[in-house]
């Protein structure tokens, strides 16, 4: 476990120097929140500033977990970095675990910063327990896409990963109600996406509305499904990396 933690720390240090990564995980959500949040309307039964706070925190953590990870994994597999790690005493799954731990650590800043904006710029006032629950929902929701990033990054070469990850990224952003709240037919379509489920669970908690069990089950089901895909990708490519 010590070796995995050292590898995770090295991954985090590498990301700290990646300006593009922090632009999409931290910079863009902050800019969008500053521009859009103060609308004085409601969305999903809560103040728009509260909804958009959750949406932008989800956006930042989702961006880092999927886009950043999938492309890096594909590139590192191509140059032989994963193969080199397998020659070390680290366990066979050390690389994947380190990527997931790195994603868990590096999504925290986007959640914290956007929540601080929501409190002091958007005027969002919540009991302490609601802040904690919503932050945990957004944070754990990002793990779904960290698992998907492993599945995509392991399975496809870099030149294919980027368009695949980008397509998945935009579909889940739009159908998840991240950029704007959904209604009508689009909402009915988007209800099954993990991004929508994470946002809706959070807004239900903020609005003191009972959270439908289906949303929680759906979020767990996506995590299980994408984790299964990640495991299959790693196993199928084990002899090729």
Image (cartoon, grey):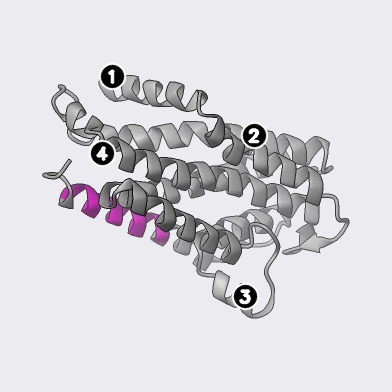
Q: Nearer the viewer, residue 126 or 145?
A: 145
- Labels 1 and 3 touching (C-beta < 8 A): no
Main SS category, magenta section = helix
Q: Which residue is mark 3?
A: 186
Q: Quadrant of residue 191?
A: bottom right
The spot of residue 85 in percent (x, y) is 20, 27
User: How far from the left and from the top, in percent, is residue 88?
Assistant: 16, 22
Question: Which label was assigned to residue 2?
Answer: 1
> Which residue matches tag 4?
77
Which mark is on residue 21? none
Q: Does residue 180 lie above or below 154 as drawn?
A: below
> Could you give the CA–CA distance between mark 1 and mark 4, rounded to whole angstroms?
23 Å
Report how far apart the C-alphas of labels 1 and 2 lie in the structure.
Answer: 27 Å
Q: Which residues are magenta?
A: 222-235
Q: Secondary structure at mark 3?
A: helix
Q: x%, y% of residue 15?
A: 47, 28
Indicate which label's residue lies in the foreground, 4 or 2: 4
User: Which one is in front in this view, the residue at disc 4 or the one at disc 3?
Assistant: 4
Distance between the alpha carbons at the discs numbered 1 and 3: 47 Å
In this image, 66 relative to 234: left or right? right
- What residue is pinned by disc 2? 112
Q: Secondary structure at mark 4?
A: helix
Disc nearer the start of the sequence (1/4): 1
Horizontal relation, residue 156 to residue 112: left or right = left
The alpha-carbon separation of the residues under discs 3 and 2 comes to: 30 Å
Q: Are marks 4 and 3 in contact (CB under 8 Å)?
A: no
Q: Quadrant of the N terminus?
A: top left
The answer to the question of whether label 3 and label 2 lie on touching residues, with beta carbons closer than 8 A, is no
Give the mark toward the camera: 1 or 3. Answer: 3
In this picture, is 236 found above or below 72?
below
């Amino acid at each position: 476990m010590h070796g995995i933690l050292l590898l995770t720390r090295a991954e985090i240090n590498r990301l700290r120097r990646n300006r593009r990564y922090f632009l999409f995980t931290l910079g863009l959500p902050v800019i969008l929140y500053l521009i859009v949040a103060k609308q004085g309307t409601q969305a999903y039964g809560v103040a728009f500033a509260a909804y958009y706070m959750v949406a932008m925190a989800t956006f930042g953590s989702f961006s880092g977990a999927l886009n950043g990870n999938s492309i890096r994994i594909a590139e590192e597999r191509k140059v032989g970095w994963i193969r080199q790690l397998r020659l070390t005493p680290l366990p066979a799954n050390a690389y994947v675990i380190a990527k997931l731990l790195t994603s868990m650590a590096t999504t925290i800043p986007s959640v914290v910063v956007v929540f601080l904006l929501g409190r002091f710029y958007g005027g969002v006032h919540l009991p302490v327990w609601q802040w904690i629950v919503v932050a945990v929902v957004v944070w754990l929701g990002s793990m779904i896409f960290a698992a998907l990033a492993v599945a995509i990054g392991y399975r496809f070469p870099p030149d294919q990963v980027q368009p695949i990850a980008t397509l998945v990224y935009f579909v889940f952003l739009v159908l998840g109600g991240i950029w704007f709240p959904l209604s009508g037919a689009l909402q009915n379509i988007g209800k099954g996406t993990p991004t929508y489920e994470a946002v809706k669970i959070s807004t239900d908690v903020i609005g003191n509305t009972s959270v439908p069990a289906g949303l929680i089950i759906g979020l767990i089901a996506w995590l299980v499904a994408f984790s299964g895909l990640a495991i299959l990708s790693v196993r199928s490519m084990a002899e090729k990396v």
